[in-house]
Amino acid sequence: MSVPKWRRSESRLDAFYEAVKLRHIVTQIIMRSYKLKTNFKSLIPDRFRNEYPELAKLFEKIDRYQETTEETKVLSKYDEWIVSKTRNNLFKYSSNLVAHISNANEIKCEIEEEFKQRILLEDAAIGDVASIKQEVQFIEEFFNIDLNKFMNYDEQLEKTKHYLYRWKKSTVKAYEKFLKEQRTEDSRP
């Protein structure tokens, strides 16, 4: 019989799961160009669409072209290098987050150095969450947009950070227990 999720404590897999969810959210932000999209009126009125249904494919092509044009107009007021740099940074930080958690998860923690290495990787993952948060805040301020109204990434950032801190706390507790056991073994005659 399994334990309900609300009754069990967090595990290191929860941290990984939340980090992967966060990476998906960040990737969506990147793919959608920070949601810089305007609502445009179609060049072709509904009256023409109804009168000439045989031209539906042509109308769709014109709409796609107009949508692309409108999106690039909004982005074009910024230099391409800054848009590209912020996208690359977000992608890098979210990829690093998942990589650090995966690497920390692979360590068995049977010797002191392994404990230290896992703690360092957990710290790096927490740093990646902070980097993502800082980058998104920069994007919101610099590009003068509000990403919160499009995607609630901040809640996911906090959730991921919470799980990482809990995981690190349990690793530190296990490390302290390991050191205590080592001292008692060394003090035995």
Image (cartoon, grey):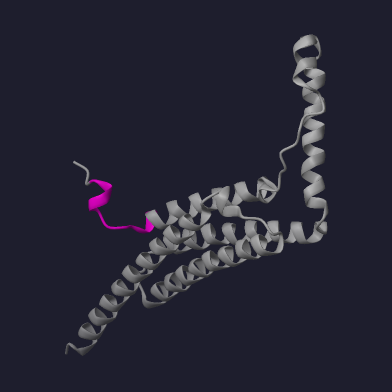
Q: Residue at x 61, y 46 (%)?
A: 28
Note whether residue 106 is visible: no
Q: Which of 16 and 42 lies nearest the eye of the viewer?
A: 42
Is residue 36 positioned above or below 181 on the image? above
Q: Quadrant of the C terminus?
A: bottom left
Camera-nearest residue between 188 and 122: 122
For the N terminus, the image quarter is: top left
Tell me what residue is drawn at x 62 percent, y 55 percent. 146
Q: Is residue 175 left or right of residue 56?
A: left
- Percent position of residue 152, x then y: 51, 51
Name the foreground residue: 108 vs 82: 82
- Determine whether, in the image, residue 26 is placed left or right of residue 168: right
Q: Which residues are magenta?
A: 4-13
Instruction: List x then y, in percent, for residue 80.
Output: 81, 56
- Is residue 112 at all visible to an observer of this figure? yes
User: Relative to 3, is 172 on the left or the right?
Assistant: right
